[in-house]
């Protein structure tokens, strides 16, 4: 197919989207420079995935299907109506050709099994995938090992080994791997598992969740005892009060967001292939997979199906266009299974046997706003159910059509689909996965989450100016309530819900995450779960003053509404949350008198770690080459070393002193922007370069180096999100969104 490149430029990607693509997705040469344009990436992906047509047809018919599919796939991505998961965008049509986002691996109760899985984890992380593990088969700590007459060290000890391996291997050579560790609530080591991340100093490459059973929730409800049994032989090792154990789970989640919960009986009750029981999920818990299965995901941008009305806030959904797009995406994702180069033969067999795919959505909050529907309202819930039922129904219909053309999935015999007489191509068709990065590319809100800010203050040169959602600006001008002063006020607040100058109906629809109570967050998750094959990746963000009882209520409410998993995050509950005052919040025991909720950042850092990572930049000055080394720790920028001139000389002494003072300032919480502001523009009469490229002095050169490394413009979505640490790529703020860790400044994410 001859491509009209002028037509292809209508992708309308934002500057932020282009920056993310250049950094993470586009082909690069050996110097790390992008050698393809975004449009070339979309063509590469569409062409490669369309080649799946040749697996089922021959000759002219196959060629015609290939051409049609290539065109449809390309237009779907160019119009930003659909984006596949990140590995597909990165790897389709390239040497790696690993297209899946995540996998689940078994952990057998033997040394051989444990270390075989460790090796398989390394292979998967190297290929760019994340991994989930169910550790519930492992015998408990101090249990007898007959082959050696020794004792077992238990599941948590082996999780630590898997965690250490993750530290050494980056996903696809670009980022550390993401893991999910799950242990059943009836395992004898469950209490050790629940508390293993309380101190935030170990197993940091894992999300952890407790596999909650219906029997346990019944015991909690009735306030009865609950047995913990040895998975090796079924022997009851300990009996506990169910509510006491539940309180420990709740307290861990209140303390720092760990553990989450997965309702394992609900998951297996809906498992379409019961011959392959589910023990774990992927790292963000939305893909429920048996051992060796994979998730092949993509998301539809719902905002793109809005039909404009006569006035802002009026309009409708183009259901016919949405139906056609859903059918095209199901074909796309089924082709991904064929074109995928799976990292292990066991994964290849299971993935092709079950043909699980997960079509999700993003841009939901954007669509609600355009329709004039309030997120936290009965109308919002009703629309969510209507939308997801439509997506799920049409996805299954597309899978039935593919089954007629290509046949049912390999493990159809013994499945629930066979029992119902429902001939489908795929065991599952829908899930709501994290869209942190692909939603940036698509230019929409993430997943089913509400907006995180209507506006924010962006630093430009020496000023801070309001940067407001362009749709909100358009609405404000059309409705006649726009003013520069109001936009600045909105940017300073992030939300409009309490700004009286904004009309009441607009305040109702333009809601942000922290405007919404946990109850409505859970209800929205349940509304989507009702018509989703697998699960929902969503974070219930709670205010800092939320109590353990609030967390307990959220978990119990989620169970009662039929949710399959739940993760909460209380603002400020991670010790690494650095506040604007340069102080750090520390964990507080519930029900105790608190004399000091904050400690100084220097005290929290408690000395220099043995190893820190960072970058060194070379800047040419009028005094010779200047080398500026900038290192970070878990709290952010930590130290700066400056080298110029020969050791023992005046220039060397000056630069060393400057570096020490910058390091001292950073240790106590000084921000790079503040340091740059102080140093930029200092002159000493010996500049290097001309015009805007001039380096005016050594301090000016240091400021230039720090600005290049640190000062990435803040993204609007980050305004109201709780910051849980520093981004390893840009040192911006990491936040919890859609059940995942994401940086809205540069697009870094562990999940998408």
Image (cartoon, grey):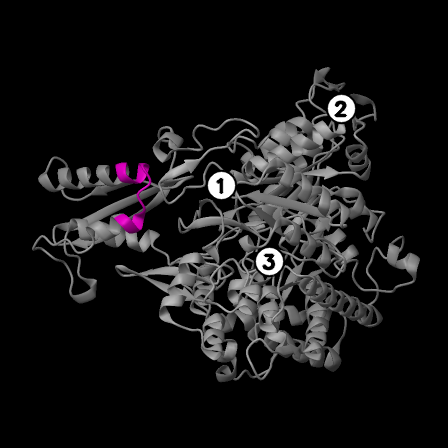
Segment colored magenta: 664-674
Q: Identify residue for label 1.
A: 572
- The quarter of the image holding the C terminus is bottom right
Q: Position of residue 344 (x, y in %)?
A: 67, 48
Can residue 486 be seen by looking at this rendering?
yes
Q: Position of residue 187 (x, y in %)?
A: 74, 29
Q: Main secondary structure of the magenta part?
A: helix
Q: What is the spatial separation of the Cα atoms under label 3 and label 1, in whole angstroms?
A: 20 Å
Q: What is the spatial separation of the Cα atoms under label 1 and label 2, in whole angstroms?
A: 31 Å
Q: Identify residue for label 2.
A: 240
Residue 243: within the magenta?
Answer: no
Residue found farthest to the left: 685
Q: Where residue 449 is drawn, which disc sits there?
A: 3
Query: Which mark sits nearer the N-terminus, 3 or 2?
Result: 2
Nearer the observer, 684 or 469: 469
Tell whether 59 sits left or right of 728: right
Q: What is the spatial separation of the Cα atoms under label 3 and label 2, in whole angstroms?
A: 37 Å
């Amino acid at each position: 197919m001859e491509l009209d490149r002028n037509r292809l430029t209508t992708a309308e990607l934002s500057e932020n989207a282009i920056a993310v693509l250049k950094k993470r997705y586009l082909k690069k040469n050996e110097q790390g420079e992008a050698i393809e344009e975004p449009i070339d990436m979309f063509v590469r992906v569409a062409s490669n995935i369309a080649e799946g047509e040749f697996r089922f047809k021959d000759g002219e018919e196959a060629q015609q299907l290939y051409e049609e599919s290539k065109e449809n796939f390309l237009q779907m991505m160019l119009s930003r109506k659909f984006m596949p998961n990140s590995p597909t965008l990165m790897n389709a049509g390239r040497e790696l050709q690993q297209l899946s986002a995540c996998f689940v691996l078994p952990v057998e109760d033997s040394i051989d099994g444990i270390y075989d899985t460790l090796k398989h984890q390394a292979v998967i992380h190297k290929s760019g995938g994340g991994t989930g593990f169910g550790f519930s088969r492992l015998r408990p700590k101090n249990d007898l090992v007959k082959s050696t007459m020794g004792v077992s060290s238990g599941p948590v000890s082996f999780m630590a080994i898997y965690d250490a391996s993750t530290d050494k291997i980056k996903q696809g050579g670009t980022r550390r791997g993401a893991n999910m560790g799950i242990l059943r609530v009836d395992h004898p080591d469950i209490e050790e598992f629940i508390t293993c991340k309380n101190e935030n100093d170990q197993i940091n490459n894992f999300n952890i969740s407790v596999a909650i059973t219906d029997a346990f929730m019944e015991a909690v409800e009735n306030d009865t005892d609950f047995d913990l049994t040895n998975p090796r032989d079924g022997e009851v090792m300990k009996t506990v009060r169910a509510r006491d154990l539940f309180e420990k789970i709740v307290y861990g989640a209140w303390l720092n967001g760990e553990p989450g919960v997965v309702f394992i009986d609900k998951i297996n009750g809906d498992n379409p292939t019961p011959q392959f029981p589910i023990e774990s999920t992927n790292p963000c818990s939305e893909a429920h997979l048996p051992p060796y299965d994979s998730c092949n995901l993509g998301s539809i941008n719902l905002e793109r199906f809005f039909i404009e009305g006569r006035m802002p806030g009026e309009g409708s959904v183009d259901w016919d266009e949405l139906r056609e797009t859903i059918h095209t995406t199901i074909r796309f994702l089924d082709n991904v299974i064929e074109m995928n180069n799976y990292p292990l033969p066991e994964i290849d067999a299971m993935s092709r046997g079950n043909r699980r795919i997960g079509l999700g959505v993003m841009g939901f909050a954007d669509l609600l706003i355009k329709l004039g529907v309030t997120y936290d309202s009965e109308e919002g819930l009703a629309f969510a159910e209507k939308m997801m039922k439509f997506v799920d129904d049409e996805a299954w219909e597309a899978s039935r059509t593919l089954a007629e053309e290509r046949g049912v999935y390999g493990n159809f015999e013994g499945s629930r689909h066979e029992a119902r007489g429902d001939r489908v191509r795929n065991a599952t068709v829908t899930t709501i996965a994290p869209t942190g990065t692909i939603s940036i590319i698509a230019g929409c809100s993430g997943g089913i989450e509400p907006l995180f800010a209507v506006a924010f203050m962006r630093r430009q040169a020496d000023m801070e100016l309001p940067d407001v959602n362009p749709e909100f600006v358009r609405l404000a001008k059309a409705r006649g309530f726009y003013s520069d002063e109001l936009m600045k006020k909105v940017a300073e607040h992030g939300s409009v819900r309490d700004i009286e100058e904004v009309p009441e109906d607009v305040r109702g629809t333009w809601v942000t995450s922290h405007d919404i109570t946990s109850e409505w967050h859970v209800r929205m998750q349940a509304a989507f779960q009702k018509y989703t094959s697998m699960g929902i990746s969503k974070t219930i963000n709670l205010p800092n003053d939320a109590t353990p009882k609030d967390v307990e209520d959220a978990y119990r409410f989620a169970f009662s509404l039929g949710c399959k998993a739940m993760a909460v995050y209380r603002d400020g509950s991670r010790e690494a949350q650095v506040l604007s005052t340069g102080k750090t919040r520390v964990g507080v025991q519930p029900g105790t008198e608190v004399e000091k909720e904050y400690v100084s950042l220097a005290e929290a850092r408690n000395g220099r770690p043995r190893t820190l990572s960072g970058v060194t930049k070379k800047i040419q000055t009028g005094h010779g080459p200047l080398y500026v080394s900038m290192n970070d720790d878990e709290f952010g920028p930590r130290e700066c070393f400056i080298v110029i001139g020969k050791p023992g000389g005046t220039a060397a002494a000056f630069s060393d002193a400057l570096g020490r003072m910058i390091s001292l300032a950073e240790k106590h919480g000084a921000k790079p922007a503040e340091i740059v502001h102080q140093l930029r523009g200092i002159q000493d009469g010996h500049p290097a370069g001309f015009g805007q490229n001039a380096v005016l002095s050594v301090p000016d050169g240091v400021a230039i180096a720090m600005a290049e490394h640190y000062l990435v413009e803040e993204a609007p979505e980050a305004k109201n999100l709780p910051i849980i640490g520093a981004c390893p790529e840009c040192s911006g703020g990491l936040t919890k969104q859609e059940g995942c860790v994401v940086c809205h400044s540069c697009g870094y994410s562990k999940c998408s």
